[in-house]
Image (cartoon, rainbow, N blue to C red):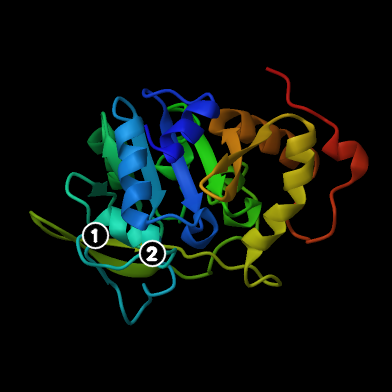
């Protein structure tokens, strides 16, 4: 048993768990293939999911999305993972997910639903909580937690999308699917997700985020449904919670969701 697998076991994770991983390979400080194979080996009865976003390259001018060839813009590990044998990738032009494991096809096919936003409640991102996913931020932080975009979509938060949609051509084995989507845009913050950092310490204080280690990297681990319930609770009180990079109101930060 290699050290990475021992660390996964120490987190209390099981072989049946479904995990969505945002990571920094530099922070992990291990061979990329070793990392990928350790994850696939450990979660051999569950599911390993990695973001394979392409929002930085998919535009009005570059609007043909082929999931087999389009590079991911979120790191080396995601690009090595998406081309590994047995890994599948969802058909979303800007916010696809690549996955390996039990029932992964059924999950990734959620992006074939009638959706037109980056992280639609009926798509893959919007269902991470529903399927019982654990989110691992490995060597990174809440700024990179794409699921919060999905939670904001569930809450219908304003000023999150472009005014106009882009028509993309989605390449499948059966032919081309033409579909229009909004992209992320905010009137003030170019990188709105940077503001998600303000929730990190409150989530730790509430026990929703637990810290671990993987390789040399710190891990922020959380249950997706618990995160969903907590952030929806906050957004119901303050819909503009993430419209600022300033620290959360201290009293709001202490309010925990009720089942």
- Asked whether residue 239 appears in the rendered view, the answer is no
Residue 122 at what x, y percent from top left? 42, 39
Quadrant for the C terminus in the image: top right
The total of numbered circles placed on residues is 2
Are the two marked residues, 2 and 1, in contact with CB atoms closer than 8 angstroms?
no
Q: Residue furthest bottom?
A: 61
Residue at 26% x, 30% y is 103
Residue 7 at what x, y percent from top left? 50, 34
- Asked whether residue 105 appears in the rendered view, the answer is yes
Is residue 255 rendered to the left or right of residue 31? right
Q: Residues within 10 Å of mark 1 (few under 14, many from 20)?
A: many
Label 2 residue SS = helix
**Residue picked out by circle 1:** 67
Give the image quarter of residue 100: top left
- The label shown at residue 94 is none
Q: Which of the two discs, 2 and 1, labels the residue nearer the N terminus? A: 1
Label 1 residue SS = loop
Is residue 197 rendered to the left or right of residue 223? right
Residue 27 at what x, y percent from top left? 55, 58
The residue nearer to you, when weighing 77 against 249, is 77
Residue at 78% x, 27% y is 256
Quadrant for the N terminus in the image: top left
Residue 214 versus residue 1 in the image, above or below: below
The residue nearer to you, when weighing 33 against 229, is 33
**Residue picked out by circle 2:** 76
């Amino acid at each position: 048993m290699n050290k990475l697998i021992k660390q996964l076991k120490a987190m209390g994770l099981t072989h049946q768990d479904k995990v969505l991983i945002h990571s920094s390979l530099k922070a992990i400080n291990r061979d990329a293939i070793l990392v990928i194979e350790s994850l696939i080996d450990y979660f051999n009865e569950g599911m390993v999911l990695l973001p394979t976003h392409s929002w930085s390259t998919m535009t009005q001018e570059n609007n043909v999305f082929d999931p087999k060839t389009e590079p991911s813009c979120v790191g080396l590990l995601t690009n090595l993972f998406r081309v590994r044998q047995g890994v599948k990738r969802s058909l979303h032009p800007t916010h696809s997910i690549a996955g390996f494991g039990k029932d992964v096809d059924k999950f990734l096919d959620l992006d074939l639903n009638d959706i037109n936003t980056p992280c639609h409640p009926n798509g893959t991102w919007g269902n991470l909580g529903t399927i019982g996913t654990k989110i691992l931020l490995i060597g990174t932080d809440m700024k990179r937690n794409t699921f919060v975009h999905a939670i904001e979509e569930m809450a219908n938060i304003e000023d999150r999308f472009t005014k106009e949609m882009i028509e993309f051509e989605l390449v499948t084995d059966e032919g081309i699917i033409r579909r229009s989507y909004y992209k992320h845009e905010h009137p003030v913050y170019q990188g709105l997700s940077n503001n998600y950092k303000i929730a990190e310490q409150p989530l730790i204080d509430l026990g929703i985020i637990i810290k671990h280690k993987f390789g040399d990297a710190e891990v922020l681990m959380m249950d997706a449904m618990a995160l969903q319930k907590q952030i929806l609770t906050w957004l119901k009180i303050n819909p503009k919670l993430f419209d600022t990079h300033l620290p959360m109101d201290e009293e709001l930060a202490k309010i925990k969701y009720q089942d």
